Amino acid sequence: MKRALPLLLALAAPLLLGQAKPILVPDVSQREIEIIYSFTGAELLLFGAIVQPGSGAPRPGDRPIDVVVVVKGPTESVVVREKQRVAGIWVNADRTRYRSAPSFYALASSRPIADIVDARTRAIYELGLDSLQLSPASGDAPAVQSRFDAGLVDLKRRAGLYYEAPGAVEISENVLYRGRVQIPARVPVGRFTAETFLIRDGRVLAAAVREIDIRKSGFERWVARAAERSSILYGIAAVLLSIGFGWAAGAIWRRF
């Protein structure tokens, strides 16, 4: 028995050490968001608790913590075109393609992300728009690729699909936190992830993920399914509908 005791302690040591770290218990206000014809956007509330080791409450002398929440949409293939002005006309001069890029990216944090973690940690966990891990399909020079990366992020930002919200996460007594993320009306549909990171002294102590489904509902969902399952019939119907509306508008105009 005496010989087995050191072996048991050695096996249990990783578990005991693991208990010294706090645990995140996150949740989101909506696990499903339905898009209908009147959808103008939504506000997603991300909240939870920070369970400290031992008593579960913050201990005297504990240093302040930071919480960062990242909401990502499904990845998509993107083509970015660069325009140049030639003889007074803007034309497509160059382009590059990305195998995968987040269709939506929002970061909410208790402080500016650059004040919370260093550049290396931001790159590892993709914390911040300047740390996104994009997947270019072309072999452009680094300078050219950086220019296209910045252009892609700028386009998404202007569309309201990429943004950062420093100070949008509130922490109460190092125990409870809550943050809000705005979902724009032009948000793509699919499976989203909400990642929560607990950070202290520039180190990620804990992380947790929750999933969110954003999908179309009602007539919009029926139209989307028709376009996916019967694309040819959908295209023919769209053309006939456009011709019908054009003819009706012309008839009304001639009458009045």
Image: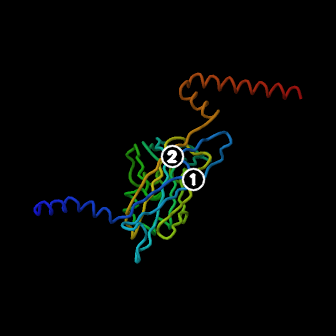
Under circle 2, the secondary element is strand
Q: Which residue is mark 2?
A: 212
Whether the residues at callouts 1 and 2 have beta carbons within 8 Å, the answer is yes
The residue under label 2 is which amino acid type?
Answer: Ile
The residue under label 1 is which amino acid type?
Answer: Leu
Whichever of callouts 1 and 2 sits on the residue coming sooner in the sequence is: 1
Q: Colour scheme of this structure image? A: rainbow
Crowd band around label 1 with a 10 angstrom C-alpha radius: few (<14), some (14–19), many (20+): some
Q: Is residue 156 left or right of residue 21?
A: right
Residue lying furthest bottom in this view?
61
Q: Which residue is mark 1?
A: 44
Q: Position of residue 78 (x, y in %)?
A: 48, 42
Count every numbered label the image shows and give the total.
2
Under circle 1, the secondary element is strand
Q: For the point 42% across and 56% down, which residue is it?
A: 126
Crowd band around label 2 with a 10 angstrom C-alpha radius: few (<14), some (14–19), many (20+): some
